[in-house]
Amino acid sequence: MPAIVLVGAQWGDEGKGKATDLLGSKVDYVVKFNGGNNAGHTVVIGGEKYALHLLPSGILTPGVTPIIGNGVVVDLAVMFNELTALKARGVDVSRLMISANAHVIPSYNIAIDKVRERFLGKRKLGTTGRGIGPTYADKMNRVGIRVQDLFDPSILAQKVESALEEKNHQLVKVFNRRAVDPEQVTQELLSYADRLRPMVVDCSLEITNALDAGKTVLFEAGQATMLDVDYGTYPYVTSSSCVAAGAATGSGMAPTRIDRVVAVHKAYTTRVGEGPFPTELHDDKGEFLRDAGFEFGTTTGRPRRCGWADTVVARYATRINGVTDYVLTKLDVLTGLAYVPICVAYDVAGQRHDEMPVSQSDFHHATPIYEEMPGWTQDIRTARTFADLPQAAQDYVLRLEELMGARISVIGVGPGREEVIVRHDLTGGDA
């Protein structure tokens, strides 16, 4: 049975949670392999909305085992608050597993993240201020705190004290803030140990055994391709690997086990935070997309920047991730427009670029070259087959598919779980 990697093809908020939920009945495990609570998934089930920030989306599907992999950074307070809230709504959360090697987000990294953004002023990166970047930096600097450290109070105290030797100097002398008490941080982290212990596993062994037993495992990325620390719009990126290759390093799965890569792509484009965005709209069309698509962050509540579909970015995502299937979401949001532009290339200083410019500076100054498609006015939320769509909507999807370089296997026509058109089975076969 397959190992399926699910990634975002744009700047995040594409609807990966819905795609995960759609696969739920065919999946035995869902593994989150990167990121933290700096992004969220919104899933609508039976008219009820569930907003997940740290937990894998598979936790909402009965029978699925959700795993937080070693590539994730974990705010334990957020995790346990989410678990409590879901349990209160009748969701079984007892199956959750977490890698012993996952790094935890100590409170001092949240403080540093927030004051650093304020310190940068106009040069800010647009982080969510949740301590994600500083925790990944600690990981690379080898002063991070891992889940397994919470079960050895002596080791934990040493690690916290060592990390704060430098960080307290930074807080006091650079940011003019109070020093953090290492003992207080240690006790705060130790308070989670007993609740955490039953969830901790060897993530790599668990996943490998599941695949060997013929189980289907879905690897769920946080953020998206254009926010990847290596392949995104650096430095306006997240601090982890959001692309398909990150599923292996963020979980302990061998890369040769990957069978399919499913990428999620909105029928238009959005991003949150700072950084270049060639197709961004600053007019009434941008407001239309924001209002019709309710484009406000699941985790932050920030209004998202909106623009037309960008197939230069999509082709890049197809290539970087090895995409086998696309899930196209929010096609219904475009209903009512007289025409729908698609960015097919960029103009940079008079030169046409059909592929992503090598230089970040060129990308920053790229002007989109559009191809306009006719719009449609019919309500498409009840469509359940491709033939049910208006011809203009069909033409739009087929043109996107041609330009993106991989088949569009699922089309979202509304926010509900059932509001989808399945053209091809995401596990590999035809629907």
Image: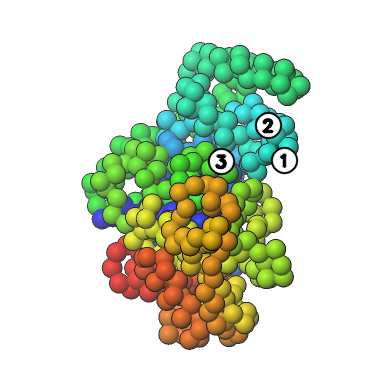
Q: Earlier in the sequence, mark 1 or mark 3?
A: 1
Q: Which residue is mark 3?
A: 235
**Can you give x and y, in whole percent of width and height, for residue 304 in the image?**
65, 57
**Label 2 close to label 3 by CB (< 8 Å):** no
Which quarter of the rendering shows the N terminus?
bottom left
412 vs 41: above or below: below
Q: Which residue is mark 2?
A: 116
Q: Amino acid at mark 2?
A: Arg
Between the C-alphas of marks 2 and 3, the distance is: 15 Å
Disc ID at residue 293: none
Residue under the image location 52 percent in, 32 percent down? 136
Q: Amino acid at mark 1?
A: Lys
Question: Coloring scheme of the render?
Answer: rainbow
Between the C-alphas of marks 2 and 1, the distance is: 12 Å
Q: Earlier in the sequence, mark 2 or mark 1?
A: 2
**Which picture quadrant has residue 408?**
bottom left
Between the C-alphas of marks 1 and 3, the distance is: 14 Å
Residue under the image location 53 percent in, 13 percent down? 158
**Can you give x and y, in whole percent of width and height, for residue 49 in the image?**
60, 61
Disc ID at residue 122: 1
Compared across the picture, whether 231 is left or right of 294 comes to left
22 vs 209: above or below: below
Question: How many discs appear?
Answer: 3
Given residues 101 and 343, the one toward you in this image is: 343
